[in-house]
Amino acid sequence: MNIREQLKGTGVAIVTPFKENESVDFDSLGQLIDSIIDNGVEYVVTLGTTGETPTLEKQEKLDIINFTFEKINGRVPVIVGIGGNNTKEVIEQVQTYPLEKATAVLSACPYYSKPSQEGIFQHYKLIAEASPKPIILYNVPGRTGRNMEANTTLRLAHEVANVAGIKEAGNNISQCIQILKDRPDNFLVVSGDDDLVLPELACGIDGVISVIANCFPKQFSDMVRAGLKFDFVTAKKLNDPLLEVYNLLFTENNPAGVKAFLSEQGFIKNITRLPVTPLSDSVYQKVAAFVNKNS
């Protein structure tokens, strides 16, 4: 089974819960993993940027990877996030991190350095050639400062054997359509923009790596499955009540928004690591009101 078949549907870029002292709260992480799997999500992404990976130490990352594999115990596929703007360091990580049980590696486009399209291509080419697992590209220009253009994605898809897919979070449906039009048959294309998933499903994407599925896993993954069947009447009915959530999740910061929802739902403490701060009181009250109204 190729990556496109394995990862069709909804993946969750899972948060990293913290205790009051900001150490990793593995009990809460385990409960959250059980919740999202029990509510129908197809796979889990650990150490995505929603997991606050820029503030995690190396040993914490290794502990989270191992805990996630042990907790999931083969119930769903697991993708591990390994990215950065130091190509040599990313290569070292994909070669030394415990990836034996991983289905793939999700690697964010280099940030801050703002490389050329050729620089992006060469970065990913070297990582893919070094990686023991397939690489899923991650284009998120709102965070990295540089858009990976459709032509670069397609060049990687056609020329580099171990590049297996892309999480496209460019907030650009036209770019997504271009990739879908010219991709190889087995090349996975998933959305990274929760609020655009419904229309992108109509364009032919394979699913999503989602933030909202941390806190609304059943409703959102049901919506995605309906959209994959081109049942957009059902998909729209499921998606419409989530429109307010999409706005609240990202109005100030991700993962501050999703951590507020999960806190109100009783899964985690509302704690982030600097430079990310919890939601302001005014926005948090809107989150609390939504959860209370819909619980």
Image: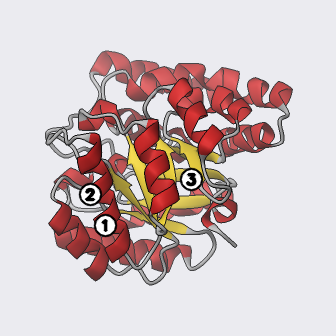
Which image quarter holds the N terminus? bottom right
Task: Kindly indicate whether the residue at mark 2 contacts the one at mark 1 (C-beta within 8 angstroms).
Answer: yes
Q: Which residue is mark 1?
A: 127
Residue 250 position by quadrant: top left
Distance from the alpha carbon under mark 1 to that under mark 2: 6 Å
Q: Which residue is mark 3?
A: 11
Nearer-N-terminus badge (3/1): 3
Taking depth in this image into account, of 183 and 10 the one nearest to the observer is 183
Distance from the alpha carbon under mark 3 to that under mark 2: 25 Å
Nearer-N-terminus badge (3/2): 3
Q: Amino acid at mark 2?
A: His
- Give the percent coordinates (x, y) of residue 290: 54, 23
For disc 2, the neighbor class at 10 Å (few under 14, some 14 to 19, many from 20) is many
Instruction: Give the number of the mark in front: 3 or 2.
Output: 2
For disc 3, the neighbor class at 10 Å (few under 14, some 14 to 19, many from 20) is many
Secondary structure of the residue carrying tag 1 is helix
Q: Which residue is mark 2?
A: 123
The image's mark for residue 85 is: none
For disc 1, the neighbor class at 10 Å (few under 14, some 14 to 19, many from 20) is many
Task: Kindly indicate whether the residue at mark 2 contacts the one at mark 3 (C-beta within 8 angstroms).
Answer: no
Secondary structure of the residue carrying tag 3 is strand
Q: Give the vertical position of 207 relative to 193 (above or below).
A: below
Which residue is found at the position 65% from the left and 69% from the top?
A: 2
Taking depth in this image into account, of 10 and 166 the one nearest to the observer is 166
Which residue is found at the position 27% from the left and 47% from the top?
A: 118
- Give the percent coordinates (x, y) of residue 143: 28, 35
Q: Is residue 114 left or right of residue 142?
A: left
Secondary structure of the residue carrying tag 2 is helix
